Amino acid sequence: MIPWLRGDEPFPPVTKALASPNGLLCAGADLSPERILDAYSHGIFPWFSDGDPILWWSPDPRMVLFPDELKVSRSLRKTIARGTYEVRMDTAFGRVMEECAAPRDGQAGTWIVPEMVAAYTRLHVRGIAHSVESWSGDTLVGGLYGLALDKVFFGESMFSRADDASKVALVALVERLRADGFRLIDCQQATAHLASLGAREISRAEFTRLLQESIQYPPTGSTWS
């Protein structure tokens, strides 16, 4: 059994998360900006399907990408050098979320439900949630979005409608994060795609330690350009 949060009841310690399903910590509460920011600053994130209660997770191990460990293939470097895509930031946050929520091969549904879109849009207005976009002319062909809290970027989802479009956006994100002194990118759960780009798993204890060292709460935000 997992606890059900009511009102402003605090999250339980992440060490209480279940081993199966990996990282399920609790349910309930709401998706207010304050609740979400508190969650992320403790290594917790919401993830649930349409019609389900809000579920909160803190998996162990945790997939992360350290900015200096990004792997850029030779072909991707050529794509960037050719200027195939124009990269913009925070110009189409809502559209990026919509594209990330669109059906994908082999998936029956999406966890980017309307409540999540509304919640992260509120954070975008506050300058905490950001999008990095790849454009071909006037067409949005790839991108990603996530939350920036102090020196940690919490990646949420990415999409691509053209070759390397999402990877170009990721490279641009990493370049910005390096320039701003960010320490890591949270990728949440392991995938072969993320591993090919240099992401790796660390223990939840190590991840929590890095958050404590890297986030001053409450965070402040600004629009990226």
Image (tube, helix red, strand yellow):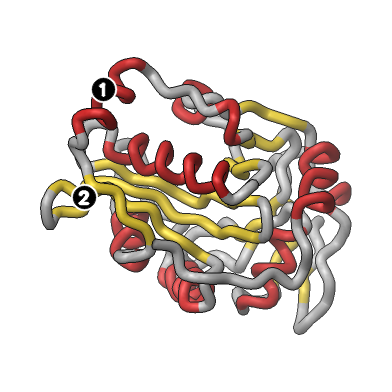
Closest to the observer, 72 or 176:
176
Specify the label residue 78 is tagged with: 1
Q: Is residue 219 left or right of residue 176?
A: right
Marks 2 and 1, how far apart at CA: 17 Å
Question: Compared to 121, does 129 lie above or below?
Answer: above
Closest to the observer, 205 or 66:
66
Closest to the observer, 207 or 149:
149
The C terminus lies in quadrant? bottom left
Which residue is under mark 2? 135
Q: Is residue 217 left or right of residue 182?
A: right
Q: Is residue 175 left or right of residue 28?
A: left
> In which image quadrant can residue 61 be found?
top right
Q: Amino acid at mark 2?
A: Trp
Task: Look at 68% across and 29% down and name the residue there.
Answer: 201
Q: Is residue 192 visible?
A: no
Q: Earlier in the sequence, mark 2 or mark 1?
A: 1
Q: Is residue 78 visible?
A: yes
Q: Is residue 118 left or right of residue 168?
A: right
- Could you say where residue 19 lies in the image, as x and y percent from the top left? 78, 39
> In which image quadrant can residue 35 be found?
bottom right
Q: In front of the other: label 2 or label 1?
A: 1
Characterize the local packing of mark 1: few (<14), some (14-19) or many (20 or more) Cα atoms within 10 angstroms.
few
Judged from this view, the residue extending furthest toward the left is 137
Judged from this view, the residue extending furthest toward the bottom is 7
Q: Secondary structure at mark 2?
A: strand
Task: Look at 84% across and 44% down and name the residue there.
Answer: 209
- Could you say where residue 48 lies in the image, as x and y percent from the top left? 55, 58
Q: How many marks?
A: 2
Closest to the observer, 176 or 30:
176
